[in-house]
Image (tube, grey):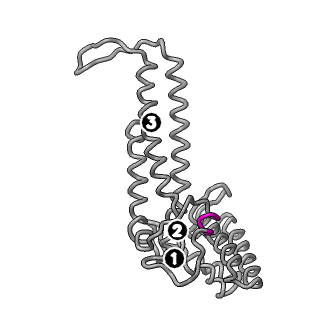
């Protein structure tokens, strides 16, 4: 369940509606990608019959197509996404969610948001470096404790900020490496008897690896990654 979203009532339904322009990778998009990965993996492992796989694929395609239409709901939570699938391909399509939970999806949503921030931070560093180079001979007054001090090059000062952003970027890279470990298939607490191929799910969704311990994946790292990500973006915002 995404943090901060109401799970029931009129307020819950309201957060599922917005104008969609086809470019936004929101929770609906990533739930759909997770379902695609589950469909491929379960079929490869022989856990779904070919008939079910075809029916589920058609239902998933219809659900995505419907959600892409302006004014239609794009659920941010699986408990409201799944009924849309059931409408298109029947109750048996809930098999796609076997071996998973709504709690082992968070890092799939979060990775791209952090990457987009990192891209913006990199663009800011490049722009600031360019300005520093252009102003390497620009004289800037300096003060220490309110007293006039030796003048500086404006370019030199700005290079200091470029270097601080570089330090921030290394921190974000380290946090991304931790976030890019898949919890998929560990469910909420103690794993699952469903023989979900966790490594194949990680591969299909672009993760570098898997979180081994199920309790860590569902109860500890699920909280850690939000805090670590938030902390990693505080310093560049402070520098800005």
Answer few, some or many: residues within 10 Å of disc 1's Cα (few below 14, many 20 plus, some between 14 and 19).
some
Q: Which residues are magenta?
A: 200-204
Q: Provide residue 178's location: percent of width, then percent of height.
A: 47, 56
Give the residue at mark 1. 101
Residue 110 badge: none
**Is residue 115 shown in magenta?**
no
Give the residue at mark 2. 105
Give the residue at mark 3. 165
Q: Upstream in the sequence, badge 3 or badge 1?
A: 1
Magenta part mainly helix, strand or loop?
helix
Q: Upstream in the sequence, badge 2 or badge 3?
A: 2
User: Would you say 10 lies left or right of 45 here?
Assistant: left
Marks 2/3: CA distance?
A: 30 Å
Proximity of marks 2 and 1: CB atoms separated by less than 8 Å: yes
Residue located farthest toward the bottom when viewing the structure as drawn: 91
Instruction: Please tell me which residue lies in front, 67 or 54.
Output: 54
Q: Provide residue 94's location: percent of width, then percent of height.
A: 61, 83
Instruction: Please tell me which residue lies in front, 196 or 132.
Output: 196
- Provide the secondary structure element on which disc 3 rests: helix
């Amino acid at each position: 369940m995404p943090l901060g979203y109401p799970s029931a009532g009129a307020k819950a339904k309201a957060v599922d509606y917005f104008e969609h322009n086809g470019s936004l990778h929101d929770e609906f998009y990533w739930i759909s990608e997770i379902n695609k990965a589950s469909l491929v993996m379960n079929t490869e492992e022989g856990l779904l019959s070919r008939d079910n796989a075809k029916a589920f694929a058609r239902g998933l395609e219809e659900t995505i197509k419907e959600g892409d239409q302006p004014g239609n709901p794009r659920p941010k939570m699986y408990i409201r996404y799944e009924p849309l699938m059931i409408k298109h391909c029947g109750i048996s399509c809930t098999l796609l969610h076997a071996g998973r939970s709504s709690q082992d999806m968070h890092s799939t949503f979060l990775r791209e948001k952090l990457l987009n921030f990192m891209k913006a931070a990199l663009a800011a560093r490049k722009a600031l470096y360019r300005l520093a180079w252009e102003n390497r001979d620009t004289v800037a007054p300096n003060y220490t404790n309110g007293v006039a001090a030796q003048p500086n090059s404006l370019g030199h000062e700005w290079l200091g900020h470029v270097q601080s952003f570089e330090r921030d970027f290394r921190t974000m890279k380290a946090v991304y490496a931790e976030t890019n470990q898949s919890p998929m298939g560990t469910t909420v607490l103690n794993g699952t008897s469903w023989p979900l191929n966790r490594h194949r799910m990680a591969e299909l969704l672009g993760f570098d690896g898997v979180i081994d311990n199920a309790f860590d994946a569902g109860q500890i790292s699920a909280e850690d990654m939000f805090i670590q990500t938030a902390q990693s973006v505080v310093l560049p915002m402070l520098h800005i």
